[in-house]
Amino acid sequence: MAQQAKKKAARQARRSNNTTAGTEGAGNTGLKASDASSARLAQLERERNEALRQLADANERIKQLEDAQEQVVHRIDWVVDSLHTLK
C-alpha cells in the first residue's frame, strides 16, 4: 500500500512538471502561464506580420514579371507584324 502511494505521488509530480515545463521558457525564468502565452502570442504575431510582408513582396514581384511578359508579347507581335509588311 505504501508503494502505491509513492508511485501515485511520483506520477502526480511528473504531471505537474509536464504542465509547468512549457511555461518556463527563456532560460528557466519561471514565467507564469499567462506571461508565456503572451510571449508566444507576440512571437506568432511577428511571424504572421513577416509572412504577410513576404506575401506582399511576392505579389509585387509577380506583378512585375507579368508586366515584363506582357511587354515581351507585344514586342514579338510587333516583330511578326513588321515581318509581314516586308513581303
Image (cartoon, rainbow, N blue to C red):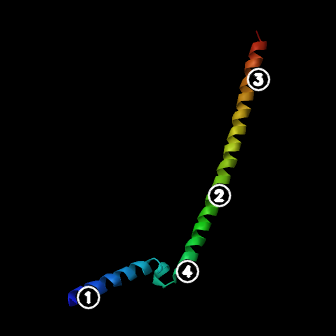
Q: Residue at x 25, y 88 (%)?
A: 6
State the CA–CA distance, disc 2 to disc 1: 54 Å
Residue at disc 4, secondary structure: helix
State the CA–CA distance, disc 4 to disc 1: 32 Å
Q: Quadrant of residue 12?
A: bottom left
Q: Residues within 10 Å of mark 1 (few under 14, many from 20)?
A: few
Of residues 81 and 86, the one drawn nearer to the viewer in this rendering: 81
Eyeballing the image, is 78 above or below 33?
above
Return the disc, 2 or 1, that comes first in the chain's sequence. 1
State the CA–CA distance, disc 1 to disc 3: 89 Å
Evaluate if marks 4 and 2 touch, with contact meaning CB atoms under 8 Å apart: no
Horizontal and vertical percent position of residue 49: 64, 63
Q: Residue at x 48, y 79 (%)?
A: 23
Left or right: where 67 falls relative to 58: right
Return the disc, 4 or 2, that comes first in the chain's sequence. 4
Identify residue for label 4.
34
Q: Residue at x 73, y 19 (%)?
A: 80
Numbered badge on residue 5: 1
Residue at disc 2, secondary structure: helix
Return the disc, 4 or 1, that comes first in the chain's sequence. 1
Of residues 58 and 32, the one drawn nearer to the viewer in this rendering: 32
Return the disc, 2 or 3, that comes first in the chain's sequence. 2
Return the disc, 1 or 3, that comes first in the chain's sequence. 1
Eyeballing the image, is 73 above or below 50?
above
Left or right: where 87 falls relative to 52: right
Identify residue for label 3.
78
Numbered badge on residue 52: 2
Residue at disc 1, secondary structure: helix
Type of residue at label 3?
Trp
